[in-house]
Amino acid sequence: MRWALVKVCLAVTTMVVVAFAVPLGLVIKEMARDRAFSNAERQAAAVAPALSITTERDQLERVVASAGSDAQMAVHIPAADGKPAVDIGRRHAADADIATVRRMGRASTTEVPGGSTLLQPVALSSGAIAVVEVYVPEAEVTNGVGTAWAVLAGVGAALVVGSVAVADRLGVRMVRPAQRLVEGAHELGEGRLGARVPEEGPTELRLAAVAFNSMADQVVQLLANERELAADLSHRLRTPLTVLRLNAASLGEGPAAEQTRAAVAQLEREVDTIIRTAREAKPQTAAAGPGAGCDAAEVVRERMEFWSALAEDEGRKWRVAGVDRPVRTPVARADLAAALDALLGNVFRHTPEGTAFAVDVHNGDDAVIVLVSDAGPGIPDPEEAMLRGSGSGSDGSTGLGLDIVRRLAESTGGDVRIGASVLGGTEVRIWFQPAGRRPAGRTRRGAVRRRRSGRLVSTFNRPRSLP
């Protein structure tokens, strides 16, 4: 497109320049000729009054000398009244041409070697016709024509070059957005979902870029929704799978029981694989904006109604605190429910039957904290447990539950801490930061608290709002 536009502009400009420059050059040439012969006519006219008065040679030579040069002007007086013919100056014209002008009685020009001559008839007092000859050299006829033509040629070339440069810039302005649109389409087709096109250039290409960016955003949103749905549905299967696994554990011994437990374990591994694949593929979602979120107290009450039935079947004591009033949390309701199910599922999966657990909600001025604690054996290596969600699992655990919780907390600017609980087992503390404010010194990975010298030490300063 760019070169096509340049060629079209080059052809059009060249035709316009030729159409105007050639006639203008011919006009300049004609004007130079007219100027030269006008000067010759003025010189001939300067001699005519003297010829009407006298035909004396001496006087006429002085008049010719004052009017022009002997080499360019001549006077031809025919013989009359017994006086011989007089020729003053240098003759250039032929005798036949002079005789023709004298007979016709009007001025004419004739071509002679080296130029042209103007033959002007003048009536004498005796009635005879004298002829004044003015020689016009070729150099005088073409004086200034070459310079004028050179100027015209330069102006025409400048116009052509300028038009080509302007056409090239216009072509670049049109082609570059189109190239970027093509590159963006290729990148999007290769799976780079972040490819976008600058919305610039002509109106049509700018509208095409807007449409492309809108389409790319829609594709990203659709893929994110699809992956989110896959991860969400897969993770929600973990809760009934936990119940299934616990029920399978109570089947006793026997081939049927072993097959059931093996099938449940296989199903859990497949679900974990689906969750990990979906979460690794999808981009991390941003924290909920102002006005979004849910009531953490309501979500905790709802999920505890489900888990309490399973807890009663296994003889587990449980406790809920801090849910007697609304606690606004800047996360989606479904995400918070999935995080609670992940932590409570870990309690039921990795602690013996009869182990007590508790869920506490704390609503501070600068944070919302959810504590899930148990009276189990605890986690030998909390740091490894936090890292397990990004790699392969060990000891029958994938760490996906903690990874889901960590990502949810970090999307608000908060974090996750693992430490020892007051019940004697593990305490997982989820810190949600309102409006995405990240406290200074906070790391991306979840924090870990350890017991040192018989007392509890936190890797972060303990907030005043914590119990």
Image (cartoon, grey):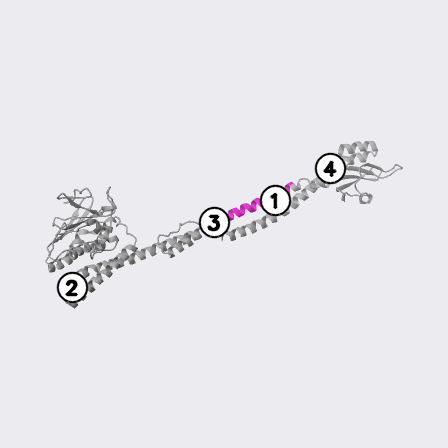
Label 3 vs label 2, nearer the camera: 2
Q: Mark 3–mark 2 contact, CB under 8 Å? A: no
Report the magenta residues as a range: 147-170
The residue that label 1 is drawn on is 153
The residue that label 4 is drawn on is 42
Label 4 vs label 3, nearer the camera: 3
Q: Mark 4–mark 3 contact, CB under 8 Å? A: no
Label 1 vs label 4, nearer the camera: 1
Q: Tell me: residue 407, above or below residue 32.
A: below
Q: Mark 1–mark 4 contact, CB under 8 Å? A: no
The residue that label 3 is drawn on is 172
Residue found at the far right of this picture: 82
Q: Earlier in the sequence, mark 2 or mark 4?
A: 4
Q: Earlier in the sequence, mark 4 or mark 3?
A: 4
Query: What element does badge 4 sit on?
Result: helix
| Viewer can see residue 332 | no
Where in the figure is residue 252, as x and y percent of width and height? 13, 65
Image quarter of residue 401:
bottom left
Q: Earlier in the sequence, mark 1 or mark 3?
A: 1
Query: What element does badge 2 sit on?
Result: helix
Report how far apart the C-alphas of labels 1 and 4 lie in the structure. Answer: 33 Å
What's the mark number on residue 275? none
Where in the figure is residue 166, as x and y percent of width and height? 51, 47
